Amino acid sequence: MLPERRGGIVGSDLVKVSDHNIDHGLRTVRRNRRSGPRRLLFWLFSFAAIFSICIATLGFKMFFHGVEEHHSILSPAVVKNVSVESGTLDQPKKKLHRARFLPCKVELNDSVEALVEPKTFWNFVKFSLNYVVMENLQSHENAITPRFGGHQTLEEREQSFHAVNQTIHCGFVEGYEGYPSTGFDLDKEDKMYMGTCTVVVSSCIFGSSDFLRRPTSKMISEYSKKNVCFIMFVDKETLVKLSNEGSAPNEKGFIGLWRMVVVSNLPYDDMRKTGKVPKFLSHRLFPSARYSIWLDSKLKLHTDPMQLIEYFLWREKSEYAISNHYTRHCVWDEVQQNKRLNKYNHTAIDEQFMFYQSDGLHKFDPSDPNKPLPSYVPEGSFIVRAHTPMSNLFSCLWFNEVDRFTSRDQLSFGYTFLKLKKTNPDKPFVLHMFKDCERRAVTKLFHHRNP
Ligand SMILES: *[C@@H]1O[C@H](CO)[C@@H](O)[C@H](O)[C@H]1NC(C)=O
Ligand SMILES: *[C@@H]1O[C@H](CO)[C@@H](O)[C@H](O)[C@H]1NC(C)=O
Ligand SMILES: *[C@@H]1O[C@H](CO)[C@@H](O)[C@H](O)[C@H]1NC(C)=O
Ligand SMILES: *[C@@H]1O[C@H](CO)[C@@H](O)[C@H](O)[C@H]1NC(C)=O
């Protein structure tokens, strides 16, 4: 039931339509006050009725507008059955829930021009990472098909967590001589353009799974419009669909601020998994970039990217910033939620989760004053990072977990972070986990096209 309902609501466009209707209704009421008393009463009643219906539906629409993100309000202890869940939502919970997920105040530095990168900012752990370009598959007895993520062994995986000079798997593993590409192929010109970017904002839409949300232009400084690359990765299908809907790129390949970059030969059948390539591997896609900001397609950028880098990284002296989840902090809850909403093959989730438990993953303890993170579950739709060695290593490790196990990256975040920390006790990885309400303050949340 829940997925069907979600499917019926496209996004806040609908909410806006209802808003408009209410405005209109009010104006009409005012106009009709001038007619005779009986007609006035009749119209007043009619409009009162319509008005309450509007309010009721608006309330519901606003509520369901948030369902994709907020269904978690019902704790696992309360509801064991999804079909019950959607039928028992009542008024008080709704209010609680709406009050709970508002944006909070984010004090940005007002002048982008005045921002200066702190001199000591790049004082993070130094080492040198190289990436596996091609695997020697000849050494294997049986024929092995080259794949984008490669064939990392468990020993290689274990070694890859060490923050030392080394060569690790990090996607983009090519097939041997004569074998067709393993995927994520880009146009030469796009690659050249991407190679020039030093600060990047990127996002992706694969399989026409979403609408295109342009950054709020008036919030983006002239400086950033000139100096920041805004890259939207799409597949051919999505580009055609967007074009048919009236959003065609101009002759330079831009739709507004977004430069549309077509990816051909997608490396995974699972579009969500393919989406993790640009999400995690921005340091590979943009080899000259010092900073990158990732946005899921459901988010519209509503803040200048340089202000975001100052706020989330420079000010915090942090090399990687991601928000915590608005309700869940323990991976155990996240696993349960993923299964309850049938987000992924349950067996595959169990395999991943069992593996992590056998490798020492513990439950989140909110009362631990020395807890390494405010939460073990991220809301990973918005990430700000400096391309430092530790940050790049973490991105590769997290990507490799998604490649090996499920595409549900909330399941692997805490484990990957804790294992990286445990493996390198004397080499800090400065991750700033900020509040979800801050993410809501700097972006605007929409609904995915397809639930
Ligand atoms: C869930 O609901 C179905 C019917 O809708 C029922 O048959 C089943 O027993 C319920 N499961 C639980 C765990 O309550
Ligand atoms: C804004 O940033 C500049 C340079 O980075 C700094 O000197 C100034 O104190 C900041 N202002 C505020 C209000 O944070
Ligand atoms: C690691 O690599 C860097 C640069 O590539 C080099 O300067 C450094 O000496 C290397 N460290 C070790 C321990 O090999
Ligand atoms: C679910 O995952 C398991 C283990 O990864 C696999 O064997 C099984 O075929 C998958 N089921 C479906 C329906 O994809």
Image (spheres, rainbow, N blue to C red):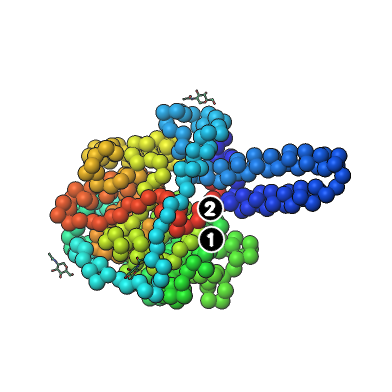
**Residue at the location (17% across, 53% down)?**
424
Q: Are marks 2 and 1 in contact (CB under 8 Å)?
A: yes
Earlier sequence position, callout 2 versus callout 1:
1
- 167 with respect to 404 (left or right): left
* Disc 2 residue crowd, few under 14, some 14–19, many 20+, Cα 10 Å: many
Quarter of the image with the N terminus is: top right
Q: Nearer the viewer, residue 152 or 376?
A: 376
The image shows residue 185 at horizontal and vertical percentages of: 43, 65
List the residue tagged with mark 1. 213
Residue 274, placed above or below residue 120: above
The image shows residue 433 at horizontal and vertical percentages of: 32, 52
Q: Quadrant of residue 130?
A: bottom left
> Do we see residue 290 in this rendering?
yes
- Whether label 2 lies within 8 Å of ligand 4 gets the answer no
> Do we see residue 181 in this rendering?
no
**Residue at the location (62% across, 49% down)?**
15
Residue 306, placed above or below residue 422: below
**Residue at the location (45% across, 58% down)?**
442
Q: Number of callouts in the render?
A: 2
List the residue tagged with mark 2. 446
Looking at the picture, which amino acid does disc 1 mark? Arg
The image shows residue 9 at horizontal and vertical percentages of: 60, 46
Looking at the picture, which amino acid does disc 2 mark? Phe
Q: Nearer the viewer, residue 12 or 196?
A: 12
- 346 with respect to 447 (left or right): left
Element assignment for label 2: loop
Q: Nearer the viewer, residue 315 or 60?
A: 315
* Disc 1 residue crowd, few under 14, some 14–19, many 20+, Cα 10 Å: some
The image shows residue 211 at horizontal and vertical percentages of: 56, 57
**Residue at the location (73% across, 48% down)?**
25
